Structures are given as structure tokens and as C-alpha cells.
Image (cartoon, rainbow, N blue to C red):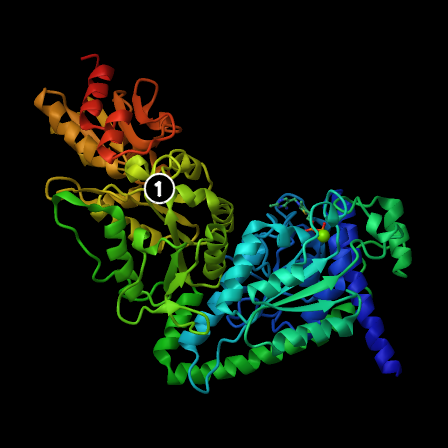
Amino acid sequence: MSQLKTQLDLDLLSINTIRTLAIDAVQQANSGHPGAPMGLAPVVYSLWQRFLRYDPADPTWANRDRFVLSAGHASMLLYATLHLAGVRAVNSHGEISGGLAVSLEEIKRFRQLDSRTPGHPESHVTTGVETTTGPLGQGAGNSVGMAIAGKWLAANYNQPGHEIFDFNVYAVCGDGDIMEGVCCEAASLAGHLKLSNLCWIYDNNRVTLDGPAEWSFDEDVAKRFAGYGWNVTHVTDANDLEMLASAYENFLNTKDRPTLIIVNSHIGYGSPHKQDSYEAHGEPMGEAEVKLVKQNYGWPVDAKFLVPDGVYDQFKNGVGKRGAAAHTTWKTKFEEYKKQFPQLAEQLNRMQTDKLPDGWDKDLPSFPADAKGLATRESSGKTLNVLAKNIPWLMGGSADLAKSNKTNLTFDGAGDFFPNEYHGRNIHFGVREHAMGAIVNGMTISKLRSFSATFFNFSDYMRPSMRLGALMEIPTIYIFTHDSIGVGEDGPTHQPVEQLASLRAMPNMLVLRPGDANEVVEAYKVILQHAHGPSTLVLTRQAMPTLDRTKYAPASGVAKGAYVLADAAGGKPEVILMASGSELSLCVEAREKLQATGIQARVVSMPCWELFEKQDAAYKESVLPSSVTARISIEMASTFGWERYTGPKGRILGMHSFGASAPLKDLLKKFGFSSDNVVAAAKEVLGK
Ligand SMILES: Cc1ncc(C[n+]2csc(CCOP(=O)(O)OP(=O)(O)O)c2C)c(N)n1
Ligand SMILES: [Mg+2]
């Protein structure tokens, strides 16, 4: 009896430590959300202590259960848990260092410059943060990608008697997450795919920032998720650890679909205010209120950042011991696996350490010169298929446009990723672009080289996820076709204009728009070797010439972002013509025409601004000599940003309006995309 009482006391003491650490950190920072951590502390505590298979001594263990805090505003909940569980820090080389992922000092520096405890959890900053969350719904979307990765790894790497992958993915969502569109899309796909390794915990506290949730949200969430094909279970009191345990067990026993646990909680639990009127929960409480809350918890009212005796040990004896034991058992299993399946083990080793297999770039196509040429979506499809054959863990799919995007993997054994058939490499995302973005990020975080695909215009539908991919510095591949008014008859609803400029404005995003088939191959080489950030690949629907590389510079120049494709005779150009993508061949044509009139022009292919910006000054000067101020750029997109390369004396040919629905040749004429217009602009800037 007294043993049980001590156990209960220690549970409550630990839960209240999470709560008060959150309260104190928010108070000290004078910003942040204390309410959600206070309400959710027992939910997360119970999960970590009793169920999460996670070894705090090795947060990189490939088969660890994943814990995602989609309600990123409750970041202190995660930081306090990582701290108390003693999760070790991992350095940028993936090595486990001696220190804690989140020390008490770092908790005291919550939301301060260069701390490990930023306002919202950032995976590239803090070990143990599985994914960056804050924009509501994204974490939930990522969790579906992680669950897909779990199923795929199990289907492809587990061998009879050697189950090395069986991890589960847990995500904590608030009302905001459950309301967001991305979350709905992701839940719909997860239900369809029957991802039984996925558990969402919905914090049903009936409050959002503006006030009671019912002001904007009163749907029957249980019914909705049942409709998606989820297993739905309820916990009517977030403070009831036994009820929580039953719910987690319910999840673990459900083998045929994902689980939603709806937890009724009180935001700011312990606050002396009437619970549902606790309105200022998105802000620090103020010292007086902090004291009252601590009094309610039976806490020393003046203590700050207190971790009472016994709490660290409690976590050590809970998640620590369980996690270490599970990890040790797994390591033994994996040693045996390595012996019996050395090739598979080697693949896993490469995958987990972000390396490519030997021969990843063998058999890549080389495209012969061809005036008619082919669409870059076509050369992309051919290249992607070779790469995926060479790289067993390169996989992905399209949001219902695979046939248009040419992203179907068609080689023998590529297969499809279907419900209960999780071995395949082709994922059918359905018409769910936003979730697709979040899901491929989740797969990438789980070490699969993952790609998504849709029309470039619909990059807007997945931009929030792409932005997080860039922030997280993860190598997700976003493939887009139908890159411009070149789409033709589909018209302005489908013709991107500002998307190139807007993605070029995104930090840490490589935007590549290759200028012919061989540049596509080179672009893929860059992308696959680019490990610390995502890439956006922008491809045409329409055919474009394959340039004669015996006459022009090799396409390997793509790696430098921009290169001299064709120079003026003697290397002394009067005018520089620059383009990316399908407009590159217009510059090539214009150069010939200018030459015929005695004007010496250089053509610069500029498939990737970001890579060009990374080159040294000498290289940049060699491509764009400052002495040549007559410069023309041409791109069937917003002109925004090209000034930096054309300079004050140059001309930018581009789009100044939305496009129109018409056959391509009429659009090219209407909007002025012809080599004659390049010639005219060149003559104009030269005053000829
Ligand atoms: C996409 C997005 N929109 C808005 C916000 C700002 N925001 C942060 S928390 C929050 C309230 C969400 O309510 P809920 O998810 O129920 O969390 P609770 O207040 O209950 O902790 C909002 C609107 C955000 N973080 N992300
Ligand atoms: Mg809420």
C-alpha cells in the first residue's frame, strides 16, 4: 500500500515538475504558453514513462518510437520532458556527446538567442525534437510520413524471425491542429493506408487562443476520425493515469488502423481561475498567479526551476530503464541481422548516416542533341527511375498527377505503397498537396530519400511544409512540372507566375529549373548529394531542345548554379543573355541571330540562383563580368529578383500579369517569349 502511495506521489511529483518547469521558463522569458504544458503534463508523462520505446542514452536509435509535439506552442512540455528523461545531445556529426539535449540551464534560457530551447521546437537545434513544429497541423502531417516510413522499413528490411523495425509514432495535437486542413488531409490518408503504428493524442481542452473552442469549432471529432477509418478512444480525465494507460494499450492492441485518443483536459490545470474561463493561456501568468498555482500543486511557492529529489530517478527508472533494455535487445537482434543479411544491414547503415549507396549515379541517361528535344518532365522521369533503381530507399509519389509529373517508378520491383502492402516505392498521395508536403518531410526525417510531385502552380498548396523542410535543413525533394505559361490551354489558374520568385526568396531552399534534358540529369546529381536542405525541381510540360553539348559547355555546370553555356567569339561579349529552363534555348537562338548582325553575345544558363550565390567572387565575375552591363534575362515567370543579375542597364523579359488560356504558340506571342524579342532587347540596351 505504502509502496503504491509512493509510486503515485512520485508520478504526481514528476508531472508537477514538468508543469512548474514550464511555468517558470515562460515566466522568466516573459513569453510563451504555459497552459497547454500544464494540462498535458500527465498525458505526456504517462506516455514516456510507461509506453514510449525510447532510449534517452541514444536518441538516434533507428527503431525508437517517435514522439511529435504537433502543438508546438506547448514547447516547454517537450523541453521539460527531454530534460527530465535525461535525453543525450547529438552533435552535427550524429555523435552522442556527454551532455544533455536540454540542460536545466537551457530551460532557464527558454526563448533566448542561441538557446536549445527556442519558442517552438526546432529539430535542427535540439536533439530529441523529432520535427520542427509550431505552424499547427504540420507535426501531425509529419507523423504520417514517419508512420509510412516505419511501415515501409518493416516491409522491406524485416526478415522472417528478424523484426528490426516496429516503431510507433505518437503525435500530440491540439484543437488548432485538428482544425487545420493539412491535418485533415493527413488523417484521411493515414486512415486509408491503415497505419496502425500511428497514434494521435488530441488535447480536447475546448479552448483556443481567442476563447472557447465552440466559438469556431464544435464538430464531432470522434465521428470524423471514425469516418476516416481510425480507431477512436476517449480519456475523460487527463489526470487519470490509469485511464491514459488503458488508452495507450488500446492503441497498441489495434493492429488494423491508426488510433486517435481524445483526451479531455483543462488548459492551465491547477490555475485557481475557473477552468474554462482561463483565457490568457497564451501568455505568461504573472508572478502572483504563478505562486497561487504552485500553492495548488503543493509546491514551494518561491522555488524556481525546482526538480525535487527523486524526480530524475523516477524518469531513469521509467523510460530510462525500459528504453535501455529495449535498445539493448534490439542491438543484439541487429548484430544477428548484420551477420545474416550483411547487404541489407549495410543499406540501413548508409541510410541512417545520410549516405548514398555505391553506384548511386550509375547508368544515368545522357541525352543526344535534338532540336525538337523533349520536355524536362520526361527527362526527369527517366533520370528519377534510374536513380531510384540505384538507391533502394529513394521513393515518393504525386498528388494524383503521377502520369503528368512522370514520377511513376516503373522499373521491375518498384511496386506501390498500398494499405497493408507497404513494400512499394510509389506512394499515391491522392489530391492532398499540403499533407503530401508534410508527409514527405516526415519520411525524409525518417531517413528515406523522399520526393513529392504536383503541378508547379500548386506548390502554393504545400508551401508551408516546404518552408519547414527548409527550416529543418532536411533533404526533401519537391518535384514540380507544368512550370509556366508553357502549360498552354489550362490557362492562368494552372500557370505559375510568381512561384519561382517566391521559392527563391525562401532561405535554404535550392530551386532548380534545368534548361534541357542533360541539365535535368545534372540537377538530380546536385539534389541527391545535397544533404542539408530541400530542393525544388521545376520542370516543363512542353518539349524543348536538347542542346548540342559538343558545341556548348557541358551540363555539369549546373552544379555551380550558373555557367557560360556559349561564349562570344574571343570571350569578349558585348551583351550577356541569361535564362533558366525552357527559355535557355531562346537565348541560344538569339545569340546566333545577334552574331549574324555582328553582335557578340554570351549565353549564361542559370538553373539555380542559390548555388550560383555560393560560388566565389572570381567565378561569379568570370560568368557575369562586371564590365559587361548590357544584360538580358528571360524567364516565363515574374521578373521579381532578376535585377540583381541584369543590373540597372539590363532588361528583364518576363511575366507582368497572370497568363491566359490559349494554345502555347499564341501565348508565347502575346507575352513576348521569342528569340526575336531577346535580340530586340539586346540591341536596345546596346543602343543599336
Ligand atoms: C497555422 C497556425 N495558425 C495559428 C497559429 C497561432 N496559434 C498558436 S496556438 C493557437 C491556439 C490553438 O489552440 P489549440 O490548438 O486548442 O491549443 P491550446 O490553446 O488549447 O493549447 C494558435 C491559433 C499557429 N501556431 N499556427
Ligand atoms: Mg485547445
Q: Is residue 560 left or right of residue 309?
A: left
How many numbered markers are drawn?
Answer: 1
Residue at point 53%, 60% (across, down): 188
Q: Quadrant of residue 592?
A: top left
Where is residue 87 drawn, in percent x and y? Answer: 63, 65
| 90 vs 475, nearest the viewer | 475
Indicate left or right for 84 with 449 as reference. right
Horizontal and vertical percent for residue 664?
25, 35
Task: Give the structural element (helix, strand or loop) at label 1.
Answer: helix
Q: Which residue is mark 1?
A: 611
Residue 116 visible within the image: no
Q: Is residue 554 shown above or below 71?
A: above
Look at label 1 and name its amino acid: Leu
Q: Position of residue 624 (x, y in %)?
A: 27, 29
Residue depicted at x 38% and y 30%: 658
Residue 488 located left or right of residue 319: left
